[in-house]
Amino acid sequence: MKIIFLGTPDFAVPSLDILIKSGYEVVGVITAPDKPAGRGQKLNISAIKHYALDHNLKVFQPVKLSDPDFLNEVRSLNADLQIVVAFRMMPEVLWSMPKYGTFNLHGSLLPQYRGAAPINRAVMNGERKTGVTTFFLRHEIDTGNIVFRQEIPIGENESAGELHDKMMIVGADLVLKTVKALEEGNIISHVQSEFVEEGEMLKSAPKIFKDDCKLNCSRSVADLHNQVRGLSPFPGAFVDIEKEDGSVFPLKIYKSLPEPAGTVLTHELISDGKSSLKLSVADGFLHLLEVQIPGKKRMKADELLRGFKFQDDWTVL
């Protein structure tokens, strides 16, 4: 079976790796164009391109997936199947090309959490389970017929980054399971509505923006803890701190611990100046365990407090 693999970030690497190690013929890899990054604007290549070059795989990096020359090159590979893991939207002319079509690995238990940020959104919403799903592509995003789903528990204090690393390994196994089932002719796909229980509300997973990252201290401590977990390590939750001179800086928060304490009337940043840093919020205190201020690296709160002091007259905005 000839396979074309489409993906870009670290999340996609285990899926490509398991195909190569299982002996499948990957005739092409499609990934994002190289992007300039850093002060020197040196071209940065994707994790998938790194892997593909290391394994002498043919790499395509089209700016436009509808480019006729690119499509002709892909067509000439005569692939039987295309597999998508963490890639951008594709035109029908591309995903409908192979004999067996194109399937995608999605980081949720579809039809829940359709969209660009399913891992983040599930953690931010305080879910205790999520999963991975393989499904065939169709016109509407993340709505195609489901092949397999695999449930994954979410720990009480687990971050999106930790879940991501766990999920990409489970996802790779599901990709391999799907390819083997296709190869053996044992595919039975299901419309997504079959996985919706009566009265169940579907939650979406839109892209994360800056407004999603700012903590609102009028929310519950449990909700804020989930927000911190769901945005860690990237892009990171934050609060804005206003100094006595009116200047404002963001305090990024990567790890927290909730302390419910009933109604709290004031919303402020509280520190003992030595090891403790916490926010008073609607119904308790959010202990800030790992943080970052501008110009400094991410560090534990007690490490930051050894050389940086939060003043009593600074305000949480």
Image: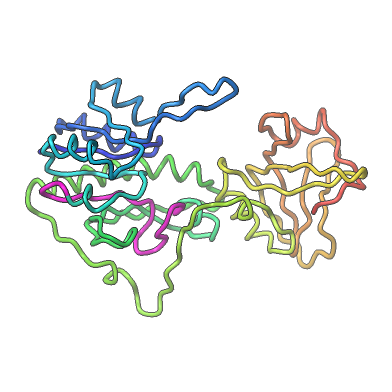
In this rendering, position of residue 33 left or right of residue 120: left
Where 173 falls versus 24 (above or below)? Answer: below
Task: Label the magenta part by its dominant secondary structure.
Answer: loop
In this rendering, position of residue 281 left or right of residue 44: right
Is 111 in the magenta?
Answer: yes
> For the N terminus, which image quadrant?
top left
Q: x, y percentage for residue 239?
A: 73, 49
- Residue drawn at x 59%, y 55% is 226
- Residue drawn at x 63%, y 43% is 255
Residues 282 and 41: in front is 41
Where 220 falls versus 225 (above or below)? Answer: below
User: Which residues are drawn in magenta?
Assistant: 97-118
- Residue drawn at x 36%, y 59% is 109
Q: x, y percentage for residue 299?
A: 68, 32
In this rendering, position of residue 116 left or right of residue 105: right
> For the C terminus, which image quadrant?
bottom right
Name the residue furthest bottom: 199
Residues 211 and 68: in front is 68
Is 269 in the magenta?
Answer: no
Within the image, what quadrant is residue 87 found in?
A: top left
